[in-house]
Image (spheres, rainbow, N blue to C red):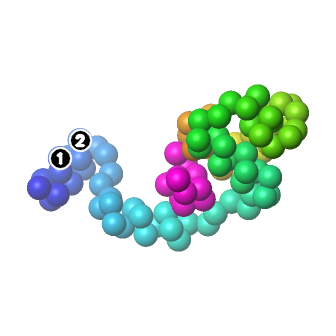
Amino acid sequence: QELTAAIRKTYSGHRYLPVELAELIAERAPRPELTPRENEVLQLIVHGLINKDIAQILGMSESTVRNHTIHLFAKLDVSDRTEAATFALQRGIIRL
């Protein structure tokens, strides 16, 4: 089944990478250097919190949370919260 799926995927112009290999690559990929505060903000983003709630939990202003979020997006090379959460979970930066 896996071979058939690989053939179909590559035939349609996509790349195929076995899950086990993709996990190994993700584990060995360099991780962005995040500050402890950025890690806290990212953890709360992964849990689906909005800036207002994150600010309240961490005892900071919403604009400070927004700044941390902007820096996170740049460091992770992502464009939104969903992408940041997905990246963090796939790379093992954040664990649920």
Q: Quadrant of the N terminus?
A: bottom left
Q: In this image, 32 relative to 18: left or right?
A: right
Q: In this image, 72 relative to 87: left or right?
A: right
Give the structural element (helix, strand or loop) at label 1: helix
Q: Please tell me which residue is depicted at 80% across the width and 35% down the height of the picture.
A: 56
Is residue 70 visible in the rendered structure shown here? Answer: no
Q: Please tell me which residue is depicted at 55% across the width and 57% down the height of the picture.
A: 95
Q: In the image, residue 81 lies at what x, y percent?
A: 62, 36
Q: Hey, what amino acid is under mark 1? A: Arg
Q: Which residues lie in the magenta part?
A: 86-96
- Residue 12 badge: 2
Q: Please tell me which residue is depicted at 74% across the width and 61% down the height of the picture.
A: 33
Q: Hey, what amino acid is under mark 2? A: Ser
Q: Is residue 95 magenta?
A: yes
Q: Is residue 9 magenta?
A: no
- Residue 8 badge: 1
